[in-house]
Amino acid sequence: MSMFIPTRSTNPRNNMRNNNQSPSADRIMPRLALGVVLAAACLLAGCGETQKPAAETAASEEKATGLSGQSKLKNGEQLIPKVAKRDISEDDRADFEKVLARYMSARKDGKVADQCDNLSSGFGKVADASPTLMEARFNQGAVLQECGQEDDAVRIWEKMPKYGPAITNLGYVAWRKGDTGRAESMFSRAVEVDPLHTIEARNNLAQLLRDRARRASSESEKKGYIGQAVTHLRTVLALDSNNLQAFATLAFIYYDMNMLEMAKLVGTQAIKKGEEIATGKFDEEKTEDKAGGEKGGKKSKKARHAEAAAGDEDGKLAKEVNVAGEGTGYTKDMKDNLALVFNTLGLVELKRKKISPAISQFKKAVEMNPKLAEARLNLAALSLNNRDYKTAEENFRAVLGMQPKNFEASIGLGVALRGNKKIDEAETQYVAAQKLDSSNPASYFNLGLLYQDYKGGDKPVLQKAQEYYRQFLSKVSDKTPDSLRRDAEKRIKDIDEIYVALAEAAKMQAEAEEMQRKAEEQQKKMEEEMKKMEAAEAKAKADAPSADSAKAGPAAGTAGTQPPSANGAAAPAAAPAATSGAGAVEGTPADGTADKETGKAKGKKTKKK
C-alpha cells in the first residue's frame, strides 16, 4: 500500500521518533515533569539532607519539558555525604516536620493552592529561625512555584547562591524561557558550588550535551559532547543507582551512537531497577570497602544501612540502602522514565529489523505512559506497515488529542482511515493536515493517491488526482525522497495513458453500441416479417373452410337433401323419390353413387337367376 508520511524516509524504520524529538518544537527531553521537590531534612546530627518528592504541577503544564529542578530520590535511596554537623534545635526540627506534614496532607487532598500562603510562610518562618536549614528556605520557594507564583519563587532561590537545588531550578526556569545558554551555566554552577546535590543538575547537563552532540558538525566534536554527557550520567548513577531518568537518557545516548548492545543492556538494567523499587525485592549485592575500594563479601542489609548512614572517615560518599523491604509501587515518575526506556528498546529492535519485538516494546511504553507521544507515533507507524489500521488509527488519534497541530500524526491518521476504507474521512483528514502546513508536500501526494486509487476511474476524478500530484511536485524540497518524486511523475504519466485508453475504450464502446443498434434493428425487422407471415398463414387457414362450403352449397340446394350430419356420414333421404325408367335415383353425388352401387348389385343378382 502506498503512503507518504512526512519524515526523512518512507521506510518505516526511519519513521520512528526518538526520545528527544517533538513534532512541533525542539525538546530537551520528553519527560513532562519539572521535578520541583520539597526537601525534608534528615534533622539528625551529622546527617545530610534527605529529599522527598513533592507535587509537580508547575512542570505538568509544560508538555515539552524534560529538565528537572531538584533531585528526585527513588525508594528512599540517596547518597549521604559526609558533611559538617548543623546546629538545628529540636524546636526547629519539630516545626519543620509539622509544616512538611501539612504540605503533604494538602498535596494529597489537592489543596496546596488553597493553602499556598500558609504553607509557604510556614517554611519561611522555620528558615528564619534556623538559617542552616536550607531545605526550609528552598521549600518556601517550591510551594510558591507550585501555586503559580514563579517570580516570587525565583527571588527566593536567587538568594541561595550556594545551594545546588535552588540553582538548578533557576537553570530550568531559564531553559523554559528559551535561554539555553543561561540554563547550562546554572546547571554547571550547581555542580561546581554544591557537588553534594548534583543529581538533577547533571541529568539536565547530560540532556543538553546529548542534543548538542546530535547537532555537532564533526565526529570528533560529537564524541566530545557524548563523553561529557556519559560522564555526568555515570556520576548520577554512582550517587543514586536507582535514578531511572539517568538510565533512560544513557540508554538513548547509546542507541543514538549505534551502540545497540549497550543501549539494550542499560535499558534492561533500568527495567530491573524499576521492578526492584516497585516491589521492594532487591537482589543481594557485593559491596566495596568504602575506604580502600576493595571488594568485600556479602553484607547484611542492616550492616549496609549502618555503614551508609555513618559515612566513612575521610568524607567519601556513602550510600543509604532501603531496608524496609516495602516497595513503592510504580509511581508516575517511574512510569514516565520506564516508558522512555521501553521506547528506546523499541528503536533498538527496529534498527535490527525485528518488527514484532519492536511493536511489543512500543506497546509497553504506551502502557507505562499513555501520554508519551513518541511511543504512540512509533507504534502507529509500525501498525500501518503491518496493515493493522485499527491500532494505527487509535494511536494517531491519541497523539492528535494531545497535540492537535501535529502534522505527522494528522497525515498518519489519514492513511489509517484510508486503510480502514473510510475514504471520505481520510480525505477530510488530509485536508485538515494541509491546513496545518500547506507548504508540506505530504498532504498533496496522499490526496492524489486517494483520488487515483480509491475514488473511481472516471476522467474528472483522475484529473483531480493529477492536479494534486502536480501540486506535490511544486512543493517538494531536498528533504523529499527522490522515490516519491519519481512515483508522482510516473502516476501523472500513467493517468495520461489511462486517458488514451479511456478514449480508445470510448470509441470501441461507441462502435459496439452502433453495431448493437443495427443488430437490434435487423432483429426487429425480422420479427416483424415473421409476425406478418404468421398472420397471413393464420388468415389463410381461417379462409379455407369458407371456400369449401361455397362449392358444396348449390348441389345441396337442388337435391333438397339434408346437410351432412355431425359425424360426416351422408344423411338418408327424407322420402323415396320417384324412380326413372332407368332405375336411377336423383340426389346428392354421394346418394347417386350409392344408388349406382345398389343398381349394380341388383343387376348381378338378376344375372345369376
Image (cartoon, rainbow, N blue to C red):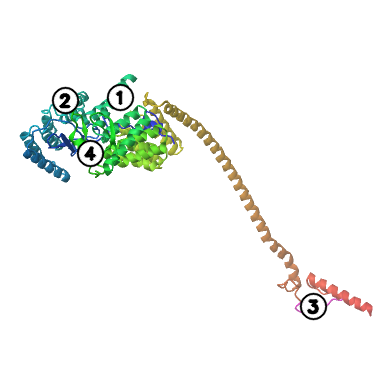
> Residue beneath label 4, please?
303
| Residue 399 can be seen, yes or no | no
Amino acid type at image mark 4: Ala
Of discs 2 and 3, which sits in the foreground? 2
> Residue beneath label 1, please?
226
Labels 3 and 1 touching (C-beta < 8 A): no
SS for dot 1: helix
- Which segment is the magenta one? 573-581
Q: Residue 519 in the image: x percent, y percent?
A: 60, 43
Label 1 vs 2, first from the N-terminus: 2
Disc 3 to disc 1, C-alpha distance:
151 Å
Of discs 4 and 2, which sits in the foreground? 4
Of discs 1 and 4, which sits in the foreground? 4
> Residue beneath label 3, please?
577
Of the 4 image quadrants, the one containing the N terminus is top left
Q: Residue 499 in the image: x percent, y percent?
A: 49, 32
- Residue drawn at point x = 24 percent, y = 40 percent: 301
| Residue 119 can be seen, yes or no | yes
